Amino acid sequence: MTRFLATRAGIWTGFAAAALVLFGAAPLLLSGFRLGLFAQFLCYAIVAVGIGLAWGRGGMLTLGQGVFFGMGAYLMAMHMKMADAEFRNGPGSVPDFMELAGIRELPAYWAPFSSPAFTIAAILIVPTAFAVLLGFAVFKRRVKGAYFAILSQALAGAFAILLIGQQSMGGFNGLSRFRYFFGYNLDDPVNQQMLYFIAAGVLLVVVAVALQLRRSRYGELLVAVRDAEERVRFLGYDAANIKVVAYATAALFASVAGAIFVPVVGIISPASIGIVPSIMFILGVAIGGRASLVGPVVGALAVAAAQTALSEQFPSAWTYAQGLLFIVVIALLPGGIASIAAATKRFRKEPATAEATA
Amino acid sequence: MQAPVPIEPGLTARKVEHRMPQRFTFTARDLTRTFAAAAAVAALVATSACGSRAGEETAAAESCVDTSGDTIKVGALNSLSGTMAISETTVRDAIYLAVDEINAAGGVLDKKIEIVAEDGASEPTVFAEKAEKLIREDCVASVFGGWTSASRKAMLPVFEDNDSLLYYPVQYEGLEASENIFYTGATTNQQIIPALDYLAETGVKSLYLVGSDYVFPRTANAIINAYAEAHGIEILGEDYVTLGSTEFSTIVNQVKSAGADAVFNTLNGDSNVAFFREYANVGLTAEEMPVMSVSIAEEEVGGIGVENIEGQLAAWNYYQTVDSPANTTFVEAFKAEYGADRVTSDPMEAAYNSVYLWAATVEKAGSFAVADVQAAADGVSFDSPEGTVVIDGENHHVTKTARIGEIHADGLLYTVWESEGPIDPDPFLDGYDWAADLQVSN
């Protein structure tokens, strides 16, 4: 089974099956509300694919993906608030939350976001460029391991605090009350389904990109850097460049996920991008299996779905159940859900060995 | 000696190499293919997008509320985990008390109320998600809950888009009036402005403003500044700290050296503990420089430590000590249900009222339908623990009596001043000329 999936035909079959589930079964089986929730989970899965690449393949424990997720989300939210204000009060008008905060003049850096093209370009370029710059600064100095993890987490905390202090970015409350997504009414169920399809489509594309990167020579170099960075350096490669590519790709994925998250969920606030959400992103990847291709996706979806299911069943005690679940999975399956096949194989073998030694 | 075991099976470089034949390189052709796949997905998405566009009407959401049985479902959406849990669980207790009482008295329109509880987890996105779940999956007739403005703002579009009802029980910064929300806590003209009236009456000529950095303190202080300008009060300083900050030595020293007649405190949560401890540390007292707080109720006094805060002032609409038959009944019922050591506070009372106000509106309308409840709401009243409250059908707020309370050694607040009767809600401050600059277009 695993061997078949590694062949070209196997890959196409895998994608076809995923597309069938995402585009066929899910919209048929799930209610409008559940489909919207699923779209939200898919956004987490897109972030997870990036983390799987940077952490699972590249060994960079990115504890601060909330920064890039937040950048994409806020950039999209700015456009949607601008579009909303312009639709109601004409060009150049101030979004509703600014009026509440006592801001009467549109800040200059908001103005370009009335353009959809500018916004999409910004979502793709700004976080990626930031990650490239940061990556060079950090990896060229050979900062790695726990130091890199602490640095990236501190960045997420700082970014959230920065936004809380900016009344012109919605402050603590964040940005919410969006009505239109590139001209489409957000309260129309058909358009909500469209958003789900966008999330599902982007997830497939992102997994395809990750797959190509894994199977390329670059992917092998990345794993080599993870396992023996010094040796790769002695062979004449610059390890920093190799790491930056994976880090920036992960940032791009997170940004795109954030941009889709905003119209799907209808709000973005510092609470969704700080340290805690950043750790939740990592948690999904760890539970799913960071080194495999679909592990992070499965993990992110499983964690989000478990969180929702548990909190609906036990509103006052679900956090304990969730904690227990994490402990059980990590203790029994250190390689994540993706390693379940290997783990059962090991389990089946063990009694035989025990007999032999007896 | 045993061979080294890889920490995680399947993670060693050699294994990966085995699975990766050289012919799989990331070529330009692969890139083209990836883009082609992306384009195909985009095309698929584009063809499915045939929903309504901006400016067009969207078909009204169908309500799925089931009124055929002998129970009616309502939602209770409070943070039961996270930083707000300590406050919001008290509100949940009050909601359950009101529902139990109404059920014991025969229910609403002869139906027993059934609560569907959800955890908002102190996160705006979770509030939005759970609100939508309550409306669309559980088909509740209305939802009670929310505390922070962030949670309310996250839920507002959900209730508007699905045309459902939220009863929000906490004092807030005003400047909002949604058709789909009933606000049973105070708006600014029922709390902030009476507090300023009281301070002005007692001869305060200068104020120092301290607040957490988010929308409520910012809006409150904008109102205080406008009020001060119109009434000849001098503002000697205005400081904000990050939510949850506990570092106050600098600010308290500035407050001390500024020598204002009083301090207006809009800090939230843990910051109050640190602020009042520091305030007492530098030797400032309630006699010398009183602090007027708008977020400290009976629940919070214990956490701050009554010795640090005794004699200070608070502005609310309800205290546990309010002397009325309705309040005696409420406090006794609450203590009987949850324990004699529990206290009742303003947000709890407002939440308790909100359930009764909803039930009374439904009885008046003779229907659970949102449109009928909205139409019947104007003038619906309830003899609540704080006095009679009446719904204003225009802005969906309620009339409330403003009360200034003093914190005593027993940890309770005692009314030292109250407004002449209930104050009509004015969330946009239309009735105050000096507030003209604060008004916003809704």
Image (spheres, coloured by chain):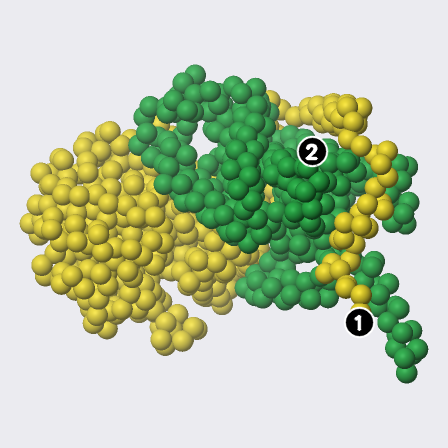
* Amino acid marked by disc 2: Val
Q: Position of residue A52 (x, y in %)?
A: 68, 46
* Amino acid marked by disc 1: Met
Q: In this view, does B399 lie above or below B60?
A: below
Chain at tag 1: B
Name the residue nearer the viewer: B15 or B415: B15
For residue A34, which quarter of the picture?
A: top right
Name the residue nearer the viewer: A62 or A323: A62
Q: Do the residues labelled 1 and 2 touch (CB within 8 Å)?
A: no
Quick check: B396 left or right of B229? right
Q: Would residue B309 be visible to someone looking at this image?
A: yes
**Label ID, residue A174:** none
Residue located farthest toward the top when viewing the structure as drawn: A91
Quick check: B437 left or right of A332? left
Q: Position of residue B239 (x, y in %)?
A: 24, 45
Q: Is residue B270 above or below residue A87?
A: below
Chain at tag 2: A
Q: Which chain is green?
A: A
Color used for chain B? yellow
Q: Where is residue B20 in the image (x, y as percent from the top left)?
A: 83, 41
Q: How many angstroms separate mark 1 from mark 2 (CA)?
A: 49 Å
Work out which quarter of the rendered image holds the N terminus of chain B and state it: bottom right
Residue that carries the numbered disc 2 in the rendered image: A202
Name the residue nearer the viewer: B111 or A251: A251
Residue that carries the numbered disc 1 in the rendered image: B1
Q: In this view, does B131 lie above or below A83?
A: below
